[in-house]
Image (cartoon, rainbow, N blue to C red):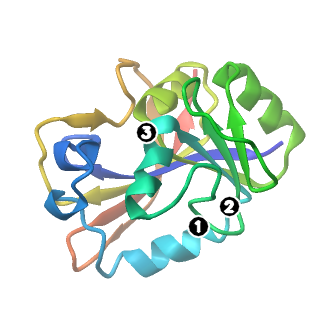
Amino acid sequence: MCELIYHVAVSLDHFIADQALIDGDIERSLFLFDGDHVPEFLEDIKGYDAVLMGRKTYEFGFLLGAKPGEPGYKGIKHYIFSKSLQFDSNEEVELIKEDAVSFIQKLKQQEKGRIWLCGGGELAGTLLKHQLLDRLILKVNPILVGKGTPLFGSEELRVNLKLLDVKPYASGVIRSEYTFMYS
């Protein structure tokens, strides 16, 4: 059985994307894409065996030059959840149009290692609701964005978490790691 880890950048007011990112204007975003926290994040990525993304998270890569069907992160199997995207799945990128919960339940049972939920607030909320997330790693950016994509989408759930680790960076980013304590 594998471990599913929601590893994501977030603002202090719990948004994983600000309005600038939603609008496709990376230059105007308040999120920190550079800084002393980035090398550890890039190292963390190497430890994942697969990555899960919702449509909007996957399409974000298009702003950086990626094309449909191409992986956003080389060397990691991608599972993209979307009913509207159209491209042929391949060895690196698999388009999943079926129910995300049942697919991920099967994936967690069949695979070993670590799976990274890269983004998709609604997808994260759905997986949390079904108690499929094992760990949460937040790269808390020292910003308030007011509105955007919420960390867990529209889900309003109550779940206890256990703090595993905290690391502050000079950039102001704080990396915090938790395990979910489902009752």
Earlier-in-chain disc, 2 versus 3 = 2
Q: Position of residue 87 (x, y in %)?
A: 66, 40
- State yes or no: discs 3 and 1 in contact (Cβ < 8 Å): no
Looking at the rendered structure, the kind of residue marked 2 is Tyr
Please tell me which residue is depicted at 61% across the width and 25% down the height of the picture.
131
Q: Position of residue 44 (x, y in %)?
A: 57, 69
Q: Secondary structure at mark 2?
A: loop
Which corner quadrant holds the C terminus?
top right
Marks 2 and 3 sit apart, C-alpha to C-alpha, by: 21 Å
**Mark 3 packing: few (<14 Cα in 10 Å), some, or many (20+)?**
some
Marks 3 and 1 sit apart, C-alpha to C-alpha, by: 20 Å
What residue does disc 2 label?
48
Please tell me which residue is depicted at 57% across the width and 29% down the height of the picture.
82
Q: Secondary structure at mark 3?
A: helix
**Mark 2 packing: few (<14 Cα in 10 Å), some, or many (20+)?**
some
Examine the rendered structure and indicate whether residue 139 appears above or below residue 125: below
Q: Position of residue 109 (x, y in %)?
A: 85, 35
- State yes or no: discs 2 and 3 in contact (Cβ < 8 Å): no
What residue does disc 1 label?
45
